[in-house]
Image (cartoon, helix red, strand yellow):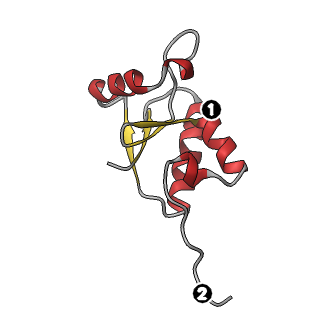
Amino acid sequence: MGVRVFVASSSGSVAIKKKQQDVVRFLEANKIEFEEVDITMSEEQRQWMYKNIPPEKKPAQGNPLPPQIFNGNQYCGDYDSFFESKESNTVLSFLGLKPRLASNAEP
């Protein structure tokens, strides 16, 4: 199943769209395989996302907003958690992936 990023393609919020794009572009740029899951196109996927976010990670009011990131059925975090891992250079561990070996390519 691998890394899945839950997004909302028809979000009216510019902030949410930018956060979703930031996650997707980072994963693409770093050649990390992932599946983009559009919760506006599938009620079943939206309910799955809501159900599988740990209670302590849900907002006090309302529903969790995209992007939400999972590795298989394991919850990784939301955009703020992703951003923190990006800033501290720990994205692979945040995603539950093994570190890559440095390539031996000549400079």
Q: Given the current orientation, which residue lies at the most extreme bottom position? A: 106
Amino acid type of disc 2?
Ala
Q: Give the vertical position of 68 relative to 55 (above or below).
A: below
Q: Which mark is residue 15?
A: 1
Q: Give the vertical position of 91 relative to 5 (above or below).
A: below
Q: Given the current orientation, which residue lies at the most extreme right position? A: 87
Task: Give the residue at x 46% y 25%.
Answer: 53
Helix, strand or loop status at disc 1: helix
Task: Give the residue at x 64% y 90%.
Answer: 106
Task: Give the residue at x 59% y 47%.
Answer: 22
From the image, state whether disc 2 or disc 1 is nearer to you: 2
Residue placed under numbered mark 2 in the picture: 105
Q: Earlier in the sequence, mark 2 or mark 1?
A: 1
Amino acid type of disc 1?
Ala
Q: Give the vertical position of 90 relative to 84 (above or below).
A: below
98 or 71: which is nearer to us? 98
Instruction: Please state if 45 lies on the left or on the right of 31 as rendered.
Output: left
Instruction: Please state if 27 lies on the left or on the right of 10 as rendered.
Output: right
Helix, strand or loop status at disc 2: loop
Q: CA distance from mark 2 to mark 1?
A: 39 Å
Q: Is there a contact, CB below 8 Å, between mark 2 and mark 1?
A: no
Q: Given the current orientation, which residue lies at the most extreme top position? A: 61
Disc 1 crowd, CA 10 A, few/some/many (<14, 14-19, 20+):
few
Residue 79: % across, % down = 59, 36
Task: Give the residue at x 50% y 31%.
Answer: 66
Residue 38: % across, % down = 37, 36
Q: Quadrant of residue 19?
A: top right
Instruction: Please state if 107 lies on the left or on the right of 31 as rendered.
Output: right
Residue 41: % across, % down = 31, 31
Q: Which mark is residue 41?
A: none
